[in-house]
Image: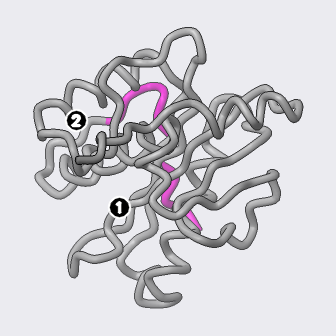
Amino acid sequence: MTEKAYPDFTFEQAAFARGARAVAGVDEVGRGPLAGPVCAAAVVLDPDNIPDGLNDSKQLTEKQRDALFDTLMASADVSIAEATVAEIEEHNILRASHIAMVRAVTGLSAPADFILIDGNMVPRGLNTPSQPIVKGDTCSLSRAAAAIVAKVWRGRLLLGSAQPRPRQSLDTAR
């Protein structure tokens, strides 16, 4: 029987060792569903105040994700962005998800100098040094945090209960 692995801060620490001061995890949600926008979140964790319980969002209950969302909004630099249904139709879902990711990164209150990206490619227009990580929410705490924020935000958006908060960037402009 293998022991279950949890995300850790290894990718972030490696970036810090190379001189980064602010490392953002970026994740998107909404590429599979047939309704609504694709949403992305960028999260810069405070290395001295990482919330307990961060994990792959798919391994958490809705209640755990909601609690972590609120904790992250209070303790991290968080930016949330969207690409609209019209943008999905105009570009394609992959490009629209990349547009949302770039918007989320640029919406952070302070620029990140290294980005851990969901997937296997760096979005066009993202000029910050980056590392794509497939299934990164299972191995990077910043990516796990971004996945949680994106998933909770999009769920609330589709239910009509999303409430903008001061630390969020909801830039949907082209």
Q: Which residue is mark 2?
A: 65
Q: How many marks?
A: 2
Tell which of 25 and 98 is nearer to you. Answer: 25
Tell which of 95 and 159 is nearer to you. Answer: 95
Q: Position of residue 38 (x, y in %)?
A: 38, 67
Residue found at the far top of this picture: 48
Q: Which label is found at residue 29?
A: 1
Q: Which quadrant of the rendered structure holds the C terminus?
A: bottom right
Instruction: State yes or no: discs 1 and 2 in contact (Cβ < 8 Å).
Output: no
Q: Position of residue 42 (x, y in %)?
A: 54, 44
Question: Reading the chain from its start, which is encountered first: label 1 or label 2?
Answer: 1
Residue found at the far front of this picture: 1
Question: What whole-number distance in Å separates the C-alpha atoms at marks 1 and 2?
Answer: 14 Å
Looking at the rendered structure, the kind of residue marked 2 is: Arg
Q: Position of residue 68 (x, y in %)?
A: 28, 27
Mark 2 is surrounded, within 10 Å at the Cα level, by few (under 14), some (14 to 19) or many (20 or more) other residues, namely: many
Residue drawn where x is 23% and y is 47% of the image: 1
Mark 1 is surrounded, within 10 Å at the Cα level, by few (under 14), some (14 to 19) or many (20 or more) other residues, namely: many
Q: Which residues are magenta?
A: 164-174
Q: Is residue 139 above or below residue 46?
A: below
Q: Which of the colour schemes (rainbow, by chain, secondary structure, one colour) is used? A: one colour
